[in-house]
Amino acid sequence: MFRTATLALVMALASAAAFSTETVPAGAPAYYDILVDTLHADDRNAMKGWEERMRAQLEAVAADPMDAEIAVWAEEIRALLDAERVPIVDEAGLLGDWKVRSMQVDDLGAFVYSWFPARVFREARALVFDKDSGSQRHRGLMALEPEHRYYFFAGALYYGYEQERMYSAHMGEDAPNANRAMDAIARVYKLGSDHFMMAFAPDEGRYRLYEIRR
């Protein structure tokens, strides 16, 4: 059901979506531009300054870590942020099954959670990120940024007891589970072979990363 709905959504977002990536007609707009154009206005700059703000919060936590475990987690998060980010030359490298763990920083400290399965698959011109396990779950569409620095993600958060949802602007007006407050914007950076970092837009002083590995 989700796969069918997602395909319909991708088709609606891009008239060229019926073609594979290799056969998109000349002159067709980049899928990145199409996806960004669907965003709510206040999400267009949601990622601005995310890293500087997250690092500042992490420094505050590290200066007063509350306990030893939080101090260790803060160092793990810092190490992920410090990892070299490499250009993305092949979208096929993100397809398939993955394991994902959430890293979070807020006024209460720094926290690193367990690994959970996730997957990335292609629907027409879009890549779909689908983490449908654990208590906090994400689904959404991704497109490669024109300079190949990262993938852009527009999706939504939902909890294990809820029906899955997508970015609210990508759901029908009558969708019972569409929820603007649960929309999620992120960038996905490549750190190395089979290693990615998904950085979400800050949410009122709360910061979240996904570490993604095979």
Image (cartoon, helix red, strand yellow):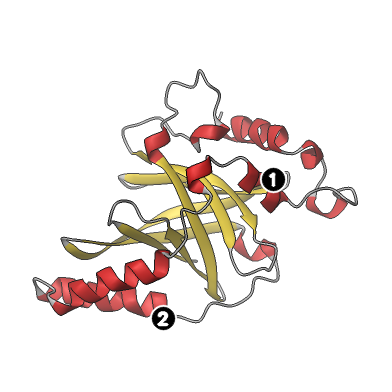
Seen as rendered, the residue at the extreme right is 26
Mark 1: few, some, or many residues within 10 Å (few <14, many ≥20)? few
Q: Amino acid at mark 1?
A: Ile
Q: Is residue 51 above or below residue 126?
A: below
Which of the two labelled residues, at mark 1 and mark 2, occupies the earlier sequence position? 1
Callout 2: SS: helix
Callout 1: SS: helix
Residue 73: image quadrant is: bottom left
Identify the residue at horizontal 19%, vertical 77% (top origin): 62
Residue 132: image quadrant is: top left
Q: Nearer the viewer, mark 1 or mark 2?
A: 1
Identify the residue at horizontal 79%, vertical 49% (top origin): 29
> What is the number of the mark on residue 161?
none
Whether residue 109 appears in this view of the structure is yes
Q: Position of residue 24 (x, y in %)?
A: 85, 49
Nearer-the-camera pick, 88 or 180:
180
204 vs 108, left or right, is right
Nearer-the-camera pick, 160 or 178:
178
Q: CA distance from mark 1 to mark 2?
A: 31 Å
Identify the residue at horizontal 63%, vertical 30% (top origin): 4
Identify the residue at horizontal 84%, vertical 48% (top origin): 28
Q: Is residue 5 above or below residue 96?
A: above
Please state, as top left, top right, bottom left or bottom right, where the N terminus lies in the image.
Answer: top right
39 vs 126, left or right, is left
- The residue carrying mark 2 is 82
> What is the number of the mark on residue 34?
1
Whether residue 132 appears in this view of the structure is no
Mark 2: few, some, or many residues within 10 Å (few <14, many ≥20)? few
